[in-house]
Image (cartoon, rainbow, N blue to C red):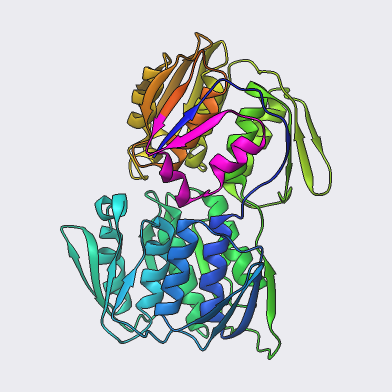
Amino acid sequence: MIATVHPSSIQGTLRVPTSKSAMQRALAAALIRKGKTILLNPGNSEDDQAALRCIQVLGARVEIESDRWVVVSEGIRPVSDELDCGESGLSIRMFTPLAALSDRPMRIIGGGSLSKRPMQFFADVLPMLGVQVKLHEGRLPIELRGPLKPQDIEVDGSLSSQFLTGLLMAYSAVGLADRTIQVNDLKSRPYIDLTVQILQHFGLPVPINENYHRFTFTDQAPVPTNEPLIFSVEGDWSGASFWLAAAPIAGALTLQGLDQNSTQADRAFWSLLDRCGIQLQVDADKLEVGVGLPGAFEFDATDCPDLFPPLVALASHIRGTSVINGVHRLAYKESDRAKSLQAEFGKLGITISLQGDQMKIMGGTGVCAAVVDAHGDHRIAMALAVAALGASGPVHIEGAESVGKSYPDFWKDLQSLGATVSLSN
């Protein structure tokens, strides 16, 4: 699909989508909790659907209503030998250790860019926990047979915190185990805070966090209850970041549904705008963002690499050179995001240089009309759309359907704010 975005002013009020980071973790917690869980404000992204399929394969029963999902689980009881995680990186890293809790042989598969991402972590770590593991040249499919038995282990946290999230979920599901996971060079620490927060809300065992270097589970069991647990999934700061970038470029916006105290890593975009002097007004359930570009900025995105695309979209309109640190975190996303951003914004007339772990965006030179490609990456597609709002002419974005991975209603929401957008096959 091709989305053609014309230079536009935008304004209005928008409720942000549900956080897929929180939604997928909540589904995993509902699976291992046992009993009935009612999820309010459920997500509808492709990654949320992948997580839904995973918990159903692993034994949960789910009733889907318009405004809630009801999950009933008796724990990990696989009903199939194959677990399809779609293109969700979080699902493959979180549900693989959970699937390994069963003694049933399992085959873990995925599609798209997920098939190219390294999974050697599982071959290195899971055998230490009593799990037989076989990979295909370090990648999918994963063949495994448990059951996983928690042990004191040491793991590498430099590639993605999602691997640790999977282990924490699995250790929590077992309970009654005094075990420690030692982690070296952990990245994206706020996402681990989100994992622990959700485990705690669901009454599941939570680890003692020793400066993000040691996570120790004490001898504790899940809190028993016969009452259904109700959990309202929070709004998505990752999706909201594109609107936070769009407002200074194209018009004032009011965003609803964001938790101001969220542990989501991408909440850091709000802090950047505040630091840069962008007009912000915060009320209980809404955030108002004024129009007006800040000066060139420097930002460390090591713990929130998903902010690179909206930051680049904003920086493309700012006069001067903006710097984003943490480029090494971009290699194994839906695309090689550093190179994808460099190539596609280059077509828009914006020079991006990659120097070691830094990305430098030479902005304020004018965003040109062009034909660009999303590289199958939802965040690249949305970043190009945001930049196009202030372009000199229409920008044609090929692969526009990729937004469905995290934000299926993105194009509809952009149109609702007054942007001129047309979609074609």
Extreme residue toward the top, this view: 365
Extreme residue toward the left, this view: 137
Q: Is residue 403 left or right of residue 335?
A: right
Q: Is residue 149 left or right of residue 133?
A: right
Q: Closest to the observer: 66 or 256?
A: 66
Residue beneath the point at 37% across and 26% down: 372
Residue beneath the point at 49% across and 71% down: 169
Residue 278, given in percent of the width and then of the height, sits at 72, 24
Residue 69, given in percent of the width and then of the height, sits at 60, 73
Queried whether the magenta region covers residue 409, the answer comes back as: yes
Task: Give, as a single range, the part of the protein colored magenta.
Answer: 397-425
> Where is the N terminus found, in terms of image quarters?
top left
Q: Is residue 25 above or below residue 212?
A: below
Q: Is residue 218 left or right of residue 129?
A: right
Q: Is residue 401 above or below residue 125?
A: above
Kindly tell me whether residue 210 is visible in this rendering.
no
Queried whether the magenta region covers residue 235, the answer comes back as: no
Q: Closest to the observer: 99 or 376?
A: 376
Residue 280, given in percent of the width and then of the height, sits at 77, 31
> Where is the C terminus found, in terms of image quarters?
top left
Residue beneath the point at 39% across and 56% down: 89
Residue beneath the point at 37% across and 84% down: 78
Kindly tell me whether residue 299 is visible in this rendering.
yes
Q: How many marks?
A: 0
Q: Place residue 29 in its image quadrant.
A: bottom right
Residue 5, given in percent of the width and then of the height, sits at 51, 27
